[in-house]
Image: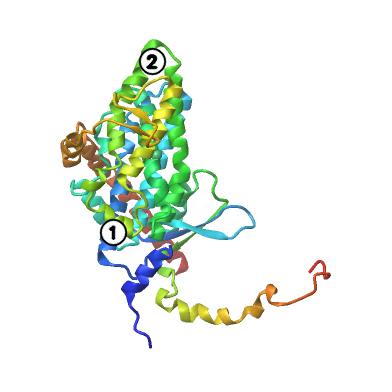
Amino acid sequence: MSNHDWPLWEIFIRSKNGLDHKHAGSLHATDAQMAIENARDVYTRRMEGVSIWVVESKYIHASNPDESSSLYDPANDKPYRHPTFYELPDELKNM
Amino acid sequence: MQIINEEKIFADKIDEEIKIEPKDWMPDQYRKTLIRQISQHAHSEIVGMLPEANWITRAPTLRRKATLIAKVQDEAGHGLYLYSAAETLNISRDEMLKQLHSGKAKYSSIFNYPTLTWADMGAIGWLVDGAAIMNQVPLCRCSYGPYARAMIRICKEESFHQRQGFEILLTLSKGSKAQKQMAQDAINRWWWPSIMMFGPNDDASPHSKQSMEWKIKRFSNDELRQKFIDVCAEQVKILGLVLPDEKLKWNEETKHYDFGEINWEEFRNVVNGNGPCNKERLEARVKAHEDGAWVRDAAAAYSEKRKSREQKAVA
Ligand SMILES: [Fe+2]
Ligand SMILES: [Fe+2]
């Protein structure tokens, strides 16, 4: 297996306990173990994370940007999903 | 159904400051420009490790040595972020490395100058990283998402690079007469190549206009160069040293520093491969890649072994 066969991995890093893992970037590695080790050196040299997830890029399925309007539009006409939709008197506290 | 005009969607996004992402439609020329720029940028980070690596074993104190190793390691990281960003445009890492190693690809010509004394580590940090930062900060708002995100990460890391360089020069400038002279000599050698890092004058820079329209670039070469000169002309006073330009003078009217003529002949020579260290840098890079082949082979063999063990364990 020569270098260019090494698969690409997407790296997700949890910056602090309690927060979500966030996409940090990608890198090449032969397997998951090596991807985690490389991610440690490439993406967390300054204590940027407490946990690393690696996913081989080919397993990531993405929404199609051309369909974004049909995918997200329906939420647009449902403002009643947001708390500000409801008109309540100012005297009402702690809600 | 509405006919989607891809070019119009792309242009609207650029207008509205919406980032272009890898799966979005983009003009061929936009893709090509970005591949060229991002891969050259990545190569510069990687080749940029060489002049400084020269001084790791000769750093004057343990503190300076640890700092220099950390800085050089950061530059390797920057190269990797940028190669990854370029790969999202459908060019492989292998192809980019081939372009670099064959001499086909360019990298920043500043790294083709030699590092003669320890003071050069100071001048490089202050001036070379300083010029790079001046160039890179606006790239954080570049229209191509993966490039912009890589640049944000890089800029965060760069600021210590410049500060440690200035600290080296400051220490030397307060030292013995010989040390102060050494600092001045380094500044004399690095100043002009550093301001050439912003590229040719605007009227001689053919790609600039299109790149500005695409919001890959936000400021012209000359604008950024002027900004850099204005900043450095003030900073150098703190060192009690001077920039090697007799024509450098504050202009009350323009509120900028006037400066002398840049030697573009030298710039073109270095870009075209005839700088003092072009050959040496490329050879060092190719040698590092070839000497590292066994590491890549071993890593690949080890992962094969682990995989077959896992399969046996399942069976
Ligand atoms: Fe860098
Ligand atoms: Fe740097």
Hey, which residue is sitting farthest bottom in the picture? B1
Q: Residues within 10 Å of mark 2 (few under 14, many from 20)?
A: some
Instruction: Give the quadrant of ligand 2.
Output: top left
Write down the chain letter for disc 1: B
In this rendering, the answer to whether A38 lies above or below B307 is: above
Is residue B129 in sight in this rendering?
no
Residue A66 location, x and y as percent?
40, 77
Dot 2 falls on a residue whose secondary structure is helix
Give the residue displayed 46% in from the left and 64% down from the top.
Answer: B313
Q: Which residue is mark 1?
A: B92
Give the residue displayed 21% in from the left and 46% down from the top.
Answer: B204
User: What numbered label is drawn on residue B179?
Assistant: 2
Q: Amino acid at mark 2?
A: Gln
Q: CA distance from mark 1 to mark 2?
A: 46 Å
Q: Amino acid at mark 1?
A: Ser
In this rendering, the answer to whether B117 lies above or below B126 is: above
Q: Is residue B5 left or right of residue A94?
A: left
Dot 1 falls on a residue whose secondary structure is loop
User: What numbered label is drawn on residue B280?
Assistant: none
Give the residue displayed 31% in from the left and 32% down from the top.
Answer: B51
Give the residue displayed 31% in from the left and 72% down from the top.
Answer: B7
Q: Residues within 10 Å of mark 1 (few under 14, many from 20)?
A: some
- In this rendered view, identify the residue nearer to me: B82 or B37: B37
In this rendering, the answer to whether B295 lies above or below A27 is: above
